[in-house]
Image (spheres, rainbow, N blue to C red):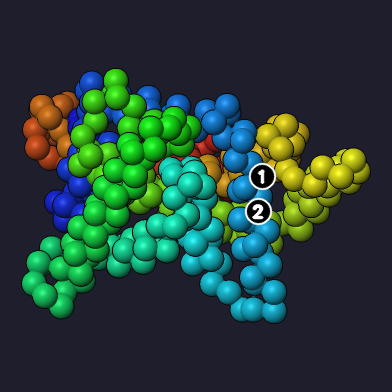
Amino acid sequence: FKPTFPASKERMLGKNAIFFHQGDYHAKLRRLVLRTFMPEAIRNIVPSIESIAKNTVQSWDGQLINTFQEMKMFAFEVSLLSIFGKDEALYFEDLKRCYYILENGYNSMPINLPGTLFHKAMKARKELAQILNKILSTRREMKRDYDDLLGSFMGEKEGLTDTQIADNVIGLIFAARDTTASVLTWILKYLGENPSILQAVTAEQESIMKSKENGEDNLTWADTKNMPITSRVIQETLRVASVLSFTFREAVEDVEFDGYLIPKGWKVLPLFRNIHHSPEIFPQPE
């Protein structure tokens, strides 16, 4: 089987994005992405992520909020930090504006006529690529090493073109935003429904805060390794909520499975939620 998506989504994200490939190209991209999210890379941005989280929560004071939409904005801020670091903050508002237009067209009919969501999305997609090209040009002029995802993609030995870099940056924003926002929203829902677990998580977080009596207020990578209850809540939420209900795959040859023939070219949707809620794997799935 190979990864596959609706043609309209492939056009919006860019045909060079990691989701649409397999083999050596996919393996190289996967290595570059994982390198950016290794502990060594994340360690230095934990205080910045905490700052984004604090500002987000403070902005809710006295407000009635749509949790999922707020989590999407939070996840977007963190994804921009991971991809571009702090150096490209000048471009963040334009990147957000274009991406929001693009996002509105993700599930639209692929009719590229003026006035349609798809047409607006494709225009925004073109502008996004132009902004990314400006950032790439500026970075090459600076001749500095960057330890963010964009810097990883730009490594000379990787041999990625500007188009390949742009497609994968836009694709990774797409991959990070809704999925992260979804799991954060489910976490809040489940904690609200389970007061004893909420109390345990709160006590764990407060104990970390109280341990910072030497004036070091920022959260550190070491602190995140000292959150066993919080970590279990995250893992169990990922299992129960199944952030991705299914994924798209296409048979590249005839496949016989469980007594059924899946012909070459047919689409298959593995249902993760069914696996996560199977009593054969999790004796008490609920």
Under mark 1, the amino acid is Pro
Specify few, some or many for label 2: CA neighbours under 10 Å numbering under 14, 14-19, or 20 or more: few
Q: Is residue 98 above or below residue 221?
A: below
Residue at which label 2 appears = 51
Tell which of 176 and 43 is nearer to you: 43
Helix, strand or loop at disc 2?
helix
Q: State the image coordinates of residue 39 (x, y, percent, origin top left).
A: 58, 28
Cα separation between marks 1 and 2 = 6 Å
Under mark 2, the amino acid is Ser
Q: Which mark is residue 163?
A: none
Quick check: 271 left or right of 233? left
Tell which of 111 and 216 is nearer to you: 216
The structure residue drawn at horizontal position 66% and vertical position 44%, both measured from the top left corner, is 47
Quick check: 153 left or right of 260? right
Helix, strand or loop at disc 1?
helix
Specify few, some or many for label 1: CA neighbours under 10 Å numbering under 14, 14-19, or 20 or more: some
Q: In this view, does 13 lie above or below 146?
A: below
**Mark 1–mark 2 contact, CB under 8 Å?**
yes
Residue at which label 1 appears = 47
Tell which of 214 and 241 is nearer to you: 214
Q: State the image coordinates of residue 179 (x, y, percent, origin top left).
A: 44, 50
The structure residue drawn at horizontal position 15% and vertical position 27%, both measured from the top left corner, is 255
